[in-house]
Image (spheres, grey):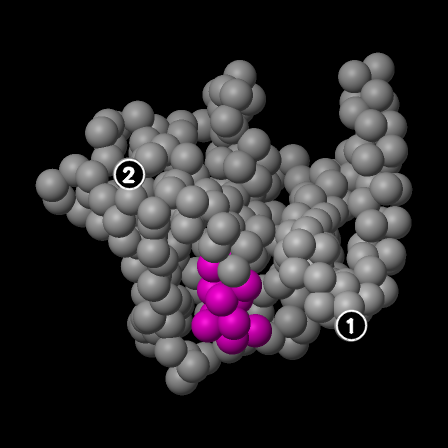
């Protein structure tokens, strides 16, 4: 019953969000034409937020309907993905007095990613840093590529002092099943599941002097863009990342 009610709720929420995404672009064009800044800002914010929320709802609906997490992958530049994530959190960061710097260069190989889900997972990590640490200061984002084995090393350095690193890092080490009772668990669970779906691992590590770094180890997958369906039961568990029951459309 609870699963059916949740399915109905998500389906009901999805409809107005889809309407927003359909109607906002012409509204945004009109705002641009009439040079009305408040409406421009509102429409841009609503569009970004609606797209992000829709990607999560679609993922959860696929899990409930078909028992899969669907990845629609493409060859993407990590620099562009990072820019999208930083743009999405820019207003929140600015309100907190936080400046986020991206040092990701354009010469890295492209990664095979689901753009909406991976970007949202990365946004979640940045937002977790902002939520857990109210202090102003700097956050730095870097990415390196390594040949053996072929993978990207993405790091999100929080240069601000964190009060309790053990509490901050615990959700990334705990079994996923134990996070369901936490009020703030949705961002953490979705980030971990989406990263697992991409074959990536997230670590929260101490940086010294009460500072932290998120490290994402993302494999370089030599594959063409495709639609992959991964067994949700495996992704939402703590089993090893291999043998996830992948099928392709």
The one of 200 and 117 positioned closer to us in this rendering: 117
Under tag 2, what secondary structure?
loop
From the viewer's perspective, is 166 left or right of 72? Answer: left
- Residue positioned most to the left: 209
The one of 100 and 56 positioned closer to us in this rendering: 100
Seen at 53% across and 37% down, the residue is 187
- Per the rendering, the mark at residue 135 is 2
In the image, the segment drawn in magenta is: 76-86
Q: Is residue 167 depicted above or below 42 in this figure?
A: above
From the viewer's perspective, is 99 left or right of 211? Answer: right
Callout 1 crowding tier (Cα within 10 Å): few <14, some 14–19, many ≥20: few
Seen at 86% across and 57% down, the residue is 22
Q: Is residue 166 depicted above or below 240 in this figure?
A: above
Residue 36, x across and y down, in percent: 71, 62
Between the residue at mark 1 and the residue at mark 2, the CA separation in whole angstroms equals 39 Å
The one of 240 and 1 positioned closer to us in this rendering: 1
| Main SS category, magenta section | helix
Residue 99 visible at all: yes
Q: Is residue 177 depicted above or below 208 in this figure?
A: above
Quadrant containing the N terminus is top right
Image quarter for residue 8?
Answer: top right
Q: Is residue 41 magenta?
A: no
How many discs appear? 2
Residue 3, x across and y down, in percent: 79, 22
Quadrant containing the C terminus is bottom right
From the viewer's perspective, is 70 left or right of 159? Answer: right
Residue 171, x across and y down, in percent: 40, 30
- Per the rendering, the mark at residue 33 is 1
- Per the rendering, the mark at residue 44 is none
Under tag 1, what secondary structure?
helix
N-term-proximal mark, 1 vs 2 = 1
Q: Nearer the viewer, mark 1 or mark 2?
A: 1
């Amino acid at each position: 019953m609870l699963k059916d009610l949740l399915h109905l709720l998500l389906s009901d929420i999805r409809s107005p969000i889809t309407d927003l995404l359909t109607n906002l672009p012409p509204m945004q064009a009109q705002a641009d034409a009439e040079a009305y800044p408040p409406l421009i800002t509102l429409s841009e914010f609503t569009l970004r937020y609606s797209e992000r929320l829709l990607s999560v709802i679609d993922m959860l609906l696929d899990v409930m309907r078909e028992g899969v997490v669907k990845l629609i992958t493409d060859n993407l530049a990590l620099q562009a993905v990072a820019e999208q994530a930083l743009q999405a959190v820019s207003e929140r960061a600015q309100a907190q007095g936080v400046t986020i710097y991206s040092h990701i260069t354009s010469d890295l190989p492209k990664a095979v990613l689901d753009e909406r889900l991976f970007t949202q997972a990365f946004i979640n990590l940045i937002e977790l840093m902002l939520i857990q640490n109210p202090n102003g200061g700097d956050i730095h984002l870097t990415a390196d590529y390594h040949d053996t084995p072929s993978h990207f090393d993405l790091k999100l350095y929080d240069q601000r002092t964190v009060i309790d690193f053990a509490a901050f890092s615990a959700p990334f080490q705990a079994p996923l099943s134990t996070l369901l009772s936490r009020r703030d668990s949705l961002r953490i669970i979705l980030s971990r599941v989406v990263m697992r779906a991409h074959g990536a691992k997230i670590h929260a590590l101490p940086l010294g002097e009460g500072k932290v770094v998120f490290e994402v180890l993302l494999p370089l997958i030599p594959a063409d863009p495709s639609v992959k369906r991964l067994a949700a039961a495996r992704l939402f568990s703590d089993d090893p990342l291999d043998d996830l029951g992948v099928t392709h459309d």
